[in-house]
Image (spheres, rainbow, N blue to C red):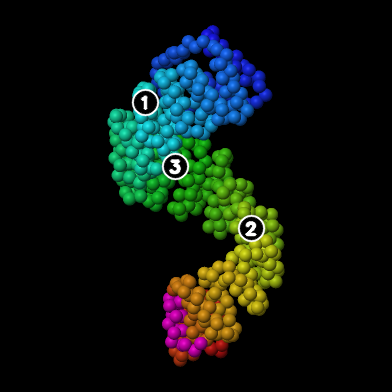
Amino acid sequence: MSHLNYLIAVSLLLVGCAQTTKPIVLEKPTPVVAPVTQVMPPVVAVTLPGIELTDAILYQYLLTEFANQRGHKALAVEGSEELAQQTRDPRLAKRAAQLALESGDMNRAVAALKLWQETEPSSSMATRMLSQLLLRGGRLDEALIEFIKVIKEDEFNRGAIFLQLYPMMAAYPDKRAILGLMSELARPYPEVAEGHWVVAQLALSAGDSVLALKEVREAARLRPEWDWPVALEAQLLSPAFPEQTLQVLSLFLARYPGASEIRLQYARALLALKQYALAHDEFEKLSLLAPDRVEMAFAVALITMQLKDLPGAEAELKHALEKGGKGQDTVAYFLGQLNEAKENDTQALIYYREVKAGEYQYRAQLRVIDLLHKQGKLLEARQYLQQISGEGEKDKLQLLMIDAQMLRENHQSLEAMQILQEGLKKFPDNEALLYEVAMLADSLGQFDASEKILRHLIYLKPDHAQAYNALGYSLLERNVRINEALVLVEQALRLAPNDPAIMDSVGWGYYRSGKLNESVAMLRSAFLANPDPEIAAHLGEVLWVKGDKAEAIQIWQASLKASPDSAPLQAVMKRYLP
């Protein structure tokens, strides 16, 4: 063993015995890129210098290692750099590079990596680490030189290297600049399909779809069996040329029918074009190719639903449910949806209750509440609701308002108000909750409380058109403070000029102000936009007062036929047509 070898062995042993963090093991550095299957180039022996061990070298080496362990990074970096320069030993140069990289000092790290390259010219690791560091530092011209070396050092595997380089280049923020670097790097290798594919991907990121399409087609020409270029070409064509997308995918599948990922892309493309029958066939093939993938059977079921074949869809979903594995909660949710569509609410409830997790759990829980309420089981629906926590403020507010709404619909408005007011204690400035409380207070005749809340809401959100409209319409309905009410609803209309409900309020305000012609014009516009029975009631009343009684009756009767349960319409007709 040479003096320097002895030095390194002994010092590492001493360091290992220290009660602090161990140094990085020099022999096993972390790879810069992910490992791939490669043809290994010949191993080149490392030439070590014959350095005489001196007390100074020993002292400096140990000082450097202990300084690093004690957290004195700058001292460790400086010491290791000096030692590597002095000895020209590749192992110490490698250690200096590691310490410099750990310190975050880019300039020192670059210098140390270059020294490692000089002392160990055969080290591809030094070149790879240097190229990556220069790239991260934005020194693209220098990085290009090193990347060229990386490929030349291992030309047996240049295709794999291009693929390894892609993730780090894709993450670079300046997309145009990194496209230029990659184009230069790939130019000497026109026969390497992977190079064209990487350029295509980076061109797509840079917004150059023309170049991307050209490069990906060249990649496909060079490696016709490779599915990645085909997938990317289809992606590029899809927005503007959907039919060409189908052609590219189907031609590849004709040659390579076992390409499941391409078949999946083809099936999704058919689905996007609403070619449901063909998409159904492709998903069915995928389901046969991968019988354990429940999502394929699930896709077949959803498309069957789209084709209005509810019995077939139910059979497919049940088949997917029987397969077990992942996705069972999703399948159960859609079985619930399907049974709702069939108006089989009892069976829908059973399936919704089986959804125990996943993205559809909360939606399923809401459907359980709604169906129980629909069946007249208010107490059970409310008890079930109390067991749901929801995620975040939005869900909690939604559950609170659903609870209040169910109470209101069951003529328990005072209880609903209590629920909403409890909610205001937790969410005092929530706009939706404030509006809901104001509307309920108005319906209970608590006009002062309603007005106070609505004015607070307007203060919080000056562009809240519905708040202006609600306050103004409440005054108009009570036939008080008409001028103020008209100002409020006209402000609402300025904020939401196409809202039929607000147009109705303004028309009603004109009526209360005696502006009958303006009222009829506005109410006609509102009714044309939305033939709502309440708007019909207002329009008919204004027409009646103007003397156009025949048209008023015609509008009322037609609207009553469409909405026989409308209380406002029944009330106005009773008043004018006893």
Q: Which kind of residue does numbered mark 3 sit on?
A: Glu
Q: Main secondary structure of the magenta part?
A: helix
Q: Nearer the viewer, residue 388 or 200?
A: 200
Residue drawn at the location 48% of the way across and 10% of the way down: 50
Residue at the spot 56% in from the left edge and 11% down from the top edge: 6
Q: Secondary structure at mark 3?
A: helix
Based on the displayed image, in which of its 4 quarters is residue 235 positioned? top left
The residue that label 3 is drawn on is 284
The residue that disc 2 covers is 396
Distance between the alpha carbons at the discs numbered 2 and 3: 40 Å
Q: For the residues carrying marks 2 and 3, which lies nearer the camera in this image?
A: 2
The image shows residue 203 at horizontal and vertical percentages of: 35, 41
The tag earlier along the polypeptide, 2 or 3, is 3
Q: Is residue 281 above or below residue 114?
A: below
Give the quadrant of residue 56: top right
Q: Secondary structure at mark 2?
A: helix
Location of residue 55 in the rendering, given as x and y in whole percent from the top left corner: 57, 14
Give the CA distance from mark 1 to mark 2. 59 Å
Asked if the residue at tag 2 contacts the one at tag 1, i.e. Cβ–Cβ closer than 8 Å, the answer is no
Q: Secondary structure at mark 1?
A: helix
* Badge 1 density bin: few <14, some 14–19, many ≥20, Cα 10 Å: some
| Front label number (1 vs 2) | 1
Circle 1: residue type: Lys
The residue identified by callout 1 is 149
Q: Is residue 113 magenta?
A: no
Against 450, residue 197 (above or below) is above
Magenta span: 513-528
Q: Specify the farthest residue to the front.
A: 56
- Most extreme residue toward the bottom, as rendered? 547
Q: Is residue 334 shown left or right of residue 446?
A: left
